[in-house]
Image (cartoon, coloured by chain):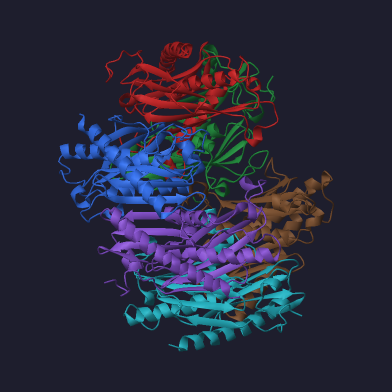
Chain colours: A green, B brown, C cyan, D red, E purple, F blue
Amino acid sequence: MRPSKRASDQMREVKIQRHVSSHAEGSCMISFGGTKVLCTASVETNLPPWRRGQGLGWVTAEYGMLPRSTGQRMRREATAGKQSGRTQEIQRLIGRSLRAVVDMKALGENQITVDCDVIEADGGTRTASITGAFVAMMDALSWMKERDLVGDNVVSDHLAAISCGIYRGTPVLDLDYDEDSAAETDANFVMTGKGGFVEIQGTAEESPFSADELAQLIGLAQKGVNELVELQKAALKDQ
Amino acid sequence: MRPSKRASDQMREVKIQRHVSSHAEGSCMISFGGTKVLCTASVETNLPPWRRGQGLGWVTAEYGMLPRSTGQRMRREATAGKQSGRTQEIQRLIGRSLRAVVDMKALGENQITVDCDVIEADGGTRTASITGAFVAMMDALSWMKERDLVGDNVVSDHLAAISCGIYRGTPVLDLDYDEDSAAETDANFVMTGKGGFVEIQGTAEESPFSADELAQLIGLAQKGVNELVELQKAALKDQ
Amino acid sequence: MRPSKRASDQMREVKIQRHVSSHAEGSCMISFGGTKVLCTASVETNLPPWRRGQGLGWVTAEYGMLPRSTGQRMRREATAGKQSGRTQEIQRLIGRSLRAVVDMKALGENQITVDCDVIEADGGTRTASITGAFVAMMDALSWMKERDLVGDNVVSDHLAAISCGIYRGTPVLDLDYDEDSAAETDANFVMTGKGGFVEIQGTAEESPFSADELAQLIGLAQKGVNELVELQKAALKDQ
Amino acid sequence: MRPSKRASDQMREVKIQRHVSSHAEGSCMISFGGTKVLCTASVETNLPPWRRGQGLGWVTAEYGMLPRSTGQRMRREATAGKQSGRTQEIQRLIGRSLRAVVDMKALGENQITVDCDVIEADGGTRTASITGAFVAMMDALSWMKERDLVGDNVVSDHLAAISCGIYRGTPVLDLDYDEDSAAETDANFVMTGKGGFVEIQGTAEESPFSADELAQLIGLAQKGVNELVELQKAALKDQ
Amino acid sequence: MRPSKRASDQMREVKIQRHVSSHAEGSCMISFGGTKVLCTASVETNLPPWRRGQGLGWVTAEYGMLPRSTGQRMRREATAGKQSGRTQEIQRLIGRSLRAVVDMKALGENQITVDCDVIEADGGTRTASITGAFVAMMDALSWMKERDLVGDNVVSDHLAAISCGIYRGTPVLDLDYDEDSAAETDANFVMTGKGGFVEIQGTAEESPFSADELAQLIGLAQKGVNELVELQKAALKDQ
Amino acid sequence: MRPSKRASDQMREVKIQRHVSSHAEGSCMISFGGTKVLCTASVETNLPPWRRGQGLGWVTAEYGMLPRSTGQRMRREATAGKQSGRTQEIQRLIGRSLRAVVDMKALGENQITVDCDVIEADGGTRTASITGAFVAMMDALSWMKERDLVGDNVVSDHLAAISCGIYRGTPVLDLDYDEDSAAETDANFVMTGKGGFVEIQGTAEESPFSADELAQLIGLAQKGVNELVELQKAALKDQ
């Protein structure tokens, strides 16, 4: 029995609210249950120096948690003077994932920076960030298209991410914080709308997991990402 | 004529929404027109080392802006590896202001840290932060009182802050970003409910201001803070 | 009664000694009683990148305290690896104040950097710094004029600064360290020779101050700045 | 055809040389073809503060690359003033992997720090590091056992790691640098001697990979880790 | 012919003015011609943690240059966020030199920190710093003796330092900046009053120097240090 | 009697193995007894900005110690976030020494960076680094000559370095760690093949050393460097 009483293959309620920033070219607030992430996509028409002059664009991401997004107040990274290893790992993952569905030639010499700032954390902040970042990026691309900066074909597919894990011996979908901190295995999957894998990360927290358990986690992730892609499509259909 | 068509002594619409964080002991989202700041107050029952063993508490604050809270994306301070001078100035101001109305003996050996994170910026983020931080702190003190950690007498008075400035030769109340970036003089006032001054900062951006203009700014600030204190009282009356 | 036996509106003895640096284009040692600050103004004919190509100059300032300028040795900021928030606040204030009386077009694409290094501290280091920085800058401008780098009209007015405060209930002028550490209210005023306000900062250390007290502090500041401007004029008259 | 002419399921020659450090309690030089990593395990009988007093030990790892271990000289991280995100990711992975096979209670209040320093890099440095780190840790544990600091039962299983990827459409085992920089998909597997998964990371560099391709990569990894574990056993058998 | 017309074995005029700081336990302003260094010695009755509980004291030094102590303004190290390699080298040298004549047991569990801040630089700042630091330390020890914190026997001998070099083929004593920047060889000698060597550093800037030249430099240094020790004695004799 | 039973003028066994790096243009592993340093020389055809456009090349060096190259594990400098003062001193010394025998005009607008990474430390790491760095640089120059980037005349002489010291009252050559940590005086000499001095550094650890002792140390160094240069020549003659 999961602490939240959810079935093993049941995600938390996911909400995506677009146009939440008056400044950003694309933005959404995404929530996976008690996890809330503000995603803003910023368009810049100049590139970092190492990327210039190749006719290719760039997509990158940054991630942060507000100090009191968690049960215990965390130290602010700006005060600490550096981003933690975990923060860097997550923002590298978000950027890499987004780039997997973007045609850099079609983007032209423009850069999109997606900021994912966790307002409230209850597990799964990185998967919520990726799923929301895709939506914010899509809106930024619409903004660019309206200004004839890009055409239609920049993005090749939908992109969403979900966590799974083995909790008390059972593979379950979309871990919340209570499950995450007790799970034997924790895995994150980034997938496309057509079911391709973009990134897969699985970690045994206590005892190793078997090939069979891995197969079950993959199945759960496929179900979860399918649902998330439907929610993205619904959200993006609205004006 | 102000860009926003407001009268010279008219504030923007101010909204205070409490209990917006599921983790923090006190919290509110405060908006001054297009400026939105999330204020969370975190209670800790241990003090920084230099403050221990004196029977006194401590109140401190940190301030941050989300990278795309502004018209142009700003560099994330955690990535830059340090807080800017401006950020440090503002968070020192918020903490100092809050401490001016707190009886440290009544607080006991506890610390309250208020985080003010700017979600959207349209001028006046430091004054909105102080005004919201007071509300979040009050809720944190209620949380402490329910647990018998403090009594009733921790806070001596209300505390709120407002900006004024001289815009195109006219003293005006509560500058928004358009006014702020063009104002000849920019001033911030932190005041108590009873009308005492806690902090006053005035800066001539272009030409010096006169004693008479300063007097007018003071009058505007008094009007503004009175209104803010009423709004705080109304917000705090609700459960 | 003030610890120094001074009358409430009496400043400490102020001395300004010019041409104390063999390298700097302008320099002075300024003392307010036991506070001694070395101010050097350095002329550079190239600008920071963000300022170039606009036909405008730039004036900036840096501030530091020698580790044993104080009663207790302070940690050297270069060893600590960063400037404190207080240091940054003060050097931003000095630069902002100087810029208020400089015509950037008349300065041309040149930069003046004023370094204010506190040799001995006994309260009022920031106001001594501003008052001395103005003199050093004037000498640097004379140096530039001799080389036809600028004309006569770069500076629009004199600039000086003084602190005031409420000490044991009485508004007093020019706080020394003993008064500063016990004052209920501490304020700094930066003013021009013609009496305009360039910057005003007042902080209630313990209990809020009233509008009436603020008015008295303003009066003291006007008297103090008048005297300082006379001293600057006398100092600058000498070869 | 692979650039190295290897069969798709063929690893590079792997060599493990133990006792290469005269100071470290355990050490080995491990090479996977042209990749050479020096692994040293250091025993400390005191723990980091947050771990003390729980009767549990700790295992951690650090990773570095010599500046000219690569084709182009890289900037030295000590000069840059921080470890890159990639370095932090890798050293977190090594430490987490080692901890998965260590019984922290059996280790007692001791810490083992494994340093993995890349002498030459030709792809697969993180998997070589993990495989070598395990050997160095085993020797450190033997050193401890000789001194009655631990018993026999500290480690529950062997641990090794291997990379796989999809290169020109074909799943291949143990990517070298030429393959790695051109691969469509790059994956790393950390597994135990009994075939359990400790960590799995797969990244699509260009186009997403399918569930079927993932299954093939898993099969290759299982073969590779089996071979590595045999090599570890052979190496550890020697005095 | 030296640019300053001095004879090859002639030092610049050296002045030592004691009691220049109102706060420091010992202090002096020392000048070697146009080089001026403020040396302050601070007594602390607590030690750094690693030195405690051994019945031994500690002497350490820090060195800094004011930004405009030089012909071109240098970047302030506190702004740069770190001390340069040169600064660290020099302050390590000063501390090491002072410790060579101090009996740490006789000093007891006290620390003396000597700050050497260069007010004006014209070559030889490190040797002026050491020579002045010794005087400031002696005054700090007198201060301690008056308070019965130490006895008479803390210092075993005088300590002074001088530079020599080979300028246009001729060994010369006490290089000024013009000579230093053109010298073929630059050397610094730290010696005791009895003529023992504490530190010797010689660097060939262009072509290597011979054993014979080295011998001549040593002779010049002995002469210079003798004169400096006489000046120290004279300075310390005064009240 | 020396702990290693060596005669007072006897060096440890020195070995130089060239071509140890598959990437670097020049490289060697050098050992002085138990001290082992990997030296790699990297050729870059672009210069640091401050050196460009003068028709001159540049040679620089960096130094590091692997964390467990020592008896006690040291903190990794990349983790600490900065290089220690000692590291900076040593790498500045290596670079300065190499530059003393290089004709920068003959090198052309190219840079050689020599990395000296200590694999095992047993005293004398800086002198081993310099001696090995010279060999690696020579191989890098051969690599450049083969590509017609430079001619024959870049290097004017051999360069090697050795430590000496006064151990239990006796001047001895080539201190190992046991001697170094107990020596009364520690000195390092960098010399050319023709016997010129490039750098000389002597430090009295406990009691000052005399002019006579210094002369004996110089004699030992001359003998040691002669032997090292012969070993360099032999090593460079091969392949």
Asked whether the viewer can see residue B12, the reply is no
Residue at x 36%, y 55% (from the top left corner): E202
Nearest the eye: B37 or B111 = B111
Residue at x 62%, y 63% (from the top left corner): E141
- Quarter of the figure with residue D140: top right
Please state the horizontal and vertical placement of residue F99, each as a whole percent of the image.
28, 49
Asked whether the viewer can see residue B193, the reply is yes
Residue at x 59%, y 86% (from the top left corner): C227
Nearest the eye: F102 or B128 = F102
Please state the horizontal and vertical placement of residue C223, each as a whole percent of the image.
63, 85
Nearest the eye: D11 or A41 = D11
Decide: is D203 above or below F162. above
Please state the horizontal and vertical placement of residue C30, each as a whole percent of the image.
54, 78
| Quarter of the figure with the C terminus of chain C | bottom left
Q: How many marks?
A: 0
| Quarter of the figure with the N terminus of chain C | bottom right
Please state the horizontal and vertical placement of residue B223, each as a whole percent of the image.
69, 69
Decide: is C20 above or below B141. below
Decide: is A137 above or below B213. above
Asked whether, in this view, residue E178 is left or right of residue C18, the answer is: left
Decide: is F119 above or below F95. above
Asked whether, in this view, residue B52 is left or right of residue C175, the answer is: right
Asked whether, in this view, residue E229 is left or right of residue A145, the answer is: right
Nearest the eye: C134 or C201 = C134
